[in-house]
Image (tube, grey):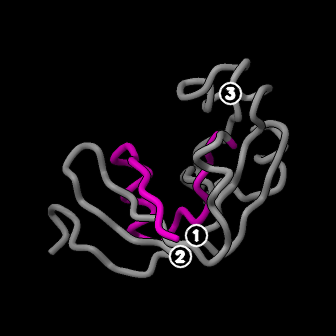
Amino acid sequence: MRHEMRLQHDPFVKIAEKTKTIEMRLLDEKRSSVSAGDLILFTDISNNEKVECLVTNIYRYPSFEELYRHHSKVSIGYDEDEPADPKDMLAYYSDEMIKKYGVVAIEIQNTLNPVLPGKG
């Protein structure tokens, strides 16, 4: 199955560069249908660049705090010298939504190397 997801520019670039290997989302109805072996077409919302990734694993958690405990900060999109804080996800999802649905860490493998603006 193929899914489509939109991303902010920074996480899109990190996926394209293969440093971000975990996409974190709310485990709502749409994300609950994602399985290992599926493909995800990510679109950068700032410039419509696209990159396709293979889903290699799915990890379900009750909260982002739990997710952050099980995955490296670089794999979830932080820089090595940057502090990783699960509260950062409150910019995207409310506490109520997180408690209602839970969260998912979608492990991905970039299958293509797109030409990024300014990089080729």
The x and y percentages for residue 16 are 39, 67
- Amino acid type assigned to the residue bearing label 2 in the image: Leu
Are there few (<14), some (14-19), or many (20+) residues within 10 Å of tag 3?
few
Q: Is residue 99 visible?
A: yes
Q: Residue at x 37, y 43 (%)?
A: 8
Q: Which label's residue is closer to the chain start, 2 or 1?
A: 2
Q: Residue at x 50, y 72 (%)?
A: 39
Q: Residue at x 29, y 44 (%)?
A: 45
Q: Nearer the viewer, residue 88 or 37?
A: 37
Q: Is residue 42 left or right of residue 48?
A: right
Number of numbered discs visible in the structure rendering: 3
Q: Which label's residue is closer to the chain start, 2 or 3?
A: 2
Q: CA distance from mark 2 to mark 3?
A: 28 Å
Residue 34 drawn above or below residue 28: below
Q: According to the image, label 1 marks what residue?
A: 108
The x and y percentages for residue 104 are 71, 49
- Amino acid type assigned to the residue bearing label 3 in the image: Lys
Whether label 2 touches label 1, CB < 8 Å: yes
Q: Is residue 45 left or right of residue 72?
A: left
Residues shaded magenta: 1-27
Q: Which element type, helix, strand or loop, lies under badge 2?
A: strand
Residue 97 drawn above or below residue 14: above
Whether label 1 touches label 3, CB < 8 Å: no
Q: CA distance from mark 1 to mark 3?
A: 23 Å
Q: According to the image, label 2 marks what residue?
A: 54
Assess whether residue 16 is covered by the magenta stretch.
yes
Q: CA distance from mark 2 to mark 1?
A: 5 Å
Q: Which element type, helix, strand or loop, lies under badge 1?
A: strand
Q: According to the image, label 3 marks what residue?
A: 87
Residue 102 drawn above or below residue 34: above
